[in-house]
Amino acid sequence: MKNIIYLVFLLSLSVFGQEEKKKKILDATLIMEIDLMHEKDQLYRGSILYDQQHLLSEEERKTLWKFQFAIDDKNTKRLIEIVKKYGYVNQHNSNLEYISILPLFLHSPKKYWKDIKSLIDREKRKGNIKDATYDKIISHMKFSIPEDLKINYLSTKKNDSLNKQ
């Protein structure tokens, strides 16, 4: 009986003794800015990638990709500033709900990859970023097609259904 009491006591210490990291409270304006960055991240990307009826010409696709990459560049610059100041923020460690900054990192131009790598390494050491998220960003940087090549690669794909008519 005495052992059971000790066991219950030790279990309660381990459960209640663990300190939960305090959530970062982000300013409402910053949350709105991150939300807007997230929306802009998909502004042209969705239209280009999901053009099922192939209404866009090659030149239009290239132009839209250039616009999207300019947005990605601005988003990445700002995202790096935010993470340097507040750390890697998400719904688990801040009041940032329903928005993930992960896609913003995944769509970052290659010229920022070295900075992003050192930034997320630091955030991982601090415990602000989960291993799976860290691995996803690193893998994406290793195996992604840089934007200048992506424009040419995506525009050379032909619509087979149109060619067979």
Image (tube, helix red, strand yellow):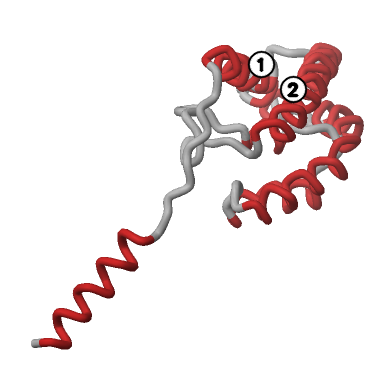
Compare marks 2 and 1 and give the one earlier in the sequence: 1
Q: Residue at x 50, y 28 (%)?
A: 25
| Residue 95 drawn at (x, y percent) | 47, 29
Q: Is residue 136 above or below residue 13?
A: above
Q: Amino acid at mark 2?
A: Asn
- Mark 1 neighbour density, 10 Å: few (under 14) some (14–19) many (20 or more): some
Q: Is label 2 or label 1 in front?
A: 2
Q: Which mark is residue 75?
A: 2
Q: Residue at x 47, y 41 (%)?
A: 22
- On screen, residue 84 versus residue 96, left or right, reads right
Q: Is residue 24 above or below residue 53?
A: below
Of 101 and 94, the residue lying toward us: 94
Q: Residue at x 43, y 50 (%)?
A: 20
Q: Which mark is residue 2?
A: none
Q: Which type of secondary structure does the marked residue at label 1 adopt?
A: helix
Residue 55 occupies which quadrant of the picture? top right
Q: Which type of secondary structure does the marked residue at label 2 adopt?
A: helix
- Residue identifier under label 1: 40
Q: Are marks 2 and 1 in contact (CB under 8 Å)?
A: yes
| Residue 141 drawn at (x, y percent) | 79, 47
Q: Residue at x 52, y 28 (%)?
A: 99
Q: Amino acid at mark 1?
A: Lys
- Mark 2 neighbour density, 10 Å: few (under 14) some (14–19) many (20 or more): many
